[in-house]
Image: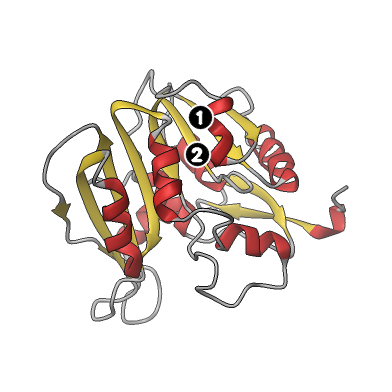
Amino acid sequence: MRSEAGVTEDGILGNRIRLRQPRDGERAAIDPVFLASAVPASTGDTVIDVGSGSGVASLCLAERGQGFGIAALEIQPDLVELARENAALNGYGDRITVYPGDLMQARYSFPTSSFDHVMTNPPYFEPGESSPSPNEARRMAHVQNGGGLADWIEACLGLVRDGGTLTVIHRAERLGALLGALEPLAGEASIFPLWPGSVKPARRVIVRARKGIRAPSVLHPGLVLHGPDGGYTVEAEQILRHAQPLVF
């Protein structure tokens, strides 16, 4: 049973969204906000947020646009509960449906190729790549539990209809592995780096690809997150505070 003392309520998207999240454990960062901004969902579409945590990406996508439903899949029971609370707290209980479950078993929960768009912020590390966190919830969020990135991507693509999109945010140094995982099943990959500063290497990259499409990848200029003073650039603020879409 989760203790209320272990939960905080915070604001994201310039306090347009209220977010209940663990005091200790996996807490919201900017990655799911940017992930949601890159999903090309429109009226009548269906979207699934894989590894949804407390629901940050789902909430941001719902705030950004109307007319499409969002399913959220999360393996940690406490985070499933928080994601459901967050959907209701922000008035999106009728648009965001949160499902408990493991992505690798998702084929038993959802019809194959049943979504127009999948968005995911996969665990950034595979077993043995980093020192595991002593916090179990944070460790589960950051370290792949069984299989690897290619297995995660294949399972996500199994949920997407032909021609639909998979949007992923990941560590920039894993771009080669990510594109390799996509290549057999998806193409027309749009690669969008997020630069911490104008002369700093990218730490994160957003990749959006279409299932069953054979077309070349495109490397976009990306977005610089921080100006010389260390604050967010105007362009980054449009995403982080004003729920604007990331067009590329």
Mark in front: 1 vs 2: 2
183 lies above or below 95: below
144 lies above or below 217: below
Q: Quadrant of residue 240?
A: bottom left
Residue visible at 34% across and 45% down? Answer: 38
Q: Which one is in front, 75 or 152? A: 152
Which element is circle 1 on? strand
Q: Which one is in front, 167 or 103? A: 103
State the CA–CA distance, disc 1 to disc 2. 7 Å
Which element is circle 2 on? strand
Q: Check if mark 1's residue and mark 2's residue have beta carbons within 8 Å.
A: yes
| Picture disc at residue 92 | none
Q: Describe residue 113's horizontal placement relative to residue 214 as left or right.
A: right
Residue visible at 32% across and 56% down? Answer: 178
Residue 243 appearing in the image:
no
Q: Amino acid at mark 2?
A: Asp
- Extreme residue toward the left, this view: 216
Residue 215 appearing in the image:
yes
Q: Describe residue 7's horizontal placement relative to residue 212 as left or right.
A: right
Percent coordinates x, y for residue 132 in the rendering? 63, 73
Percent coordinates x, y for residue 156 in the rendering? 43, 39
Residue visible at 48% across and 63% down? Answer: 124
225 lies above or below 49: below
Q: Amino acid at mark 1?
A: Ile
- Extreme residue toward the front, this view: 147
Q: Which one is in front, 76 or 192? A: 76
Q: Describe residue 97's horizontal placement relative to residue 169 as left or right.
A: right
User: Label 1: which residue?
Assistant: 70
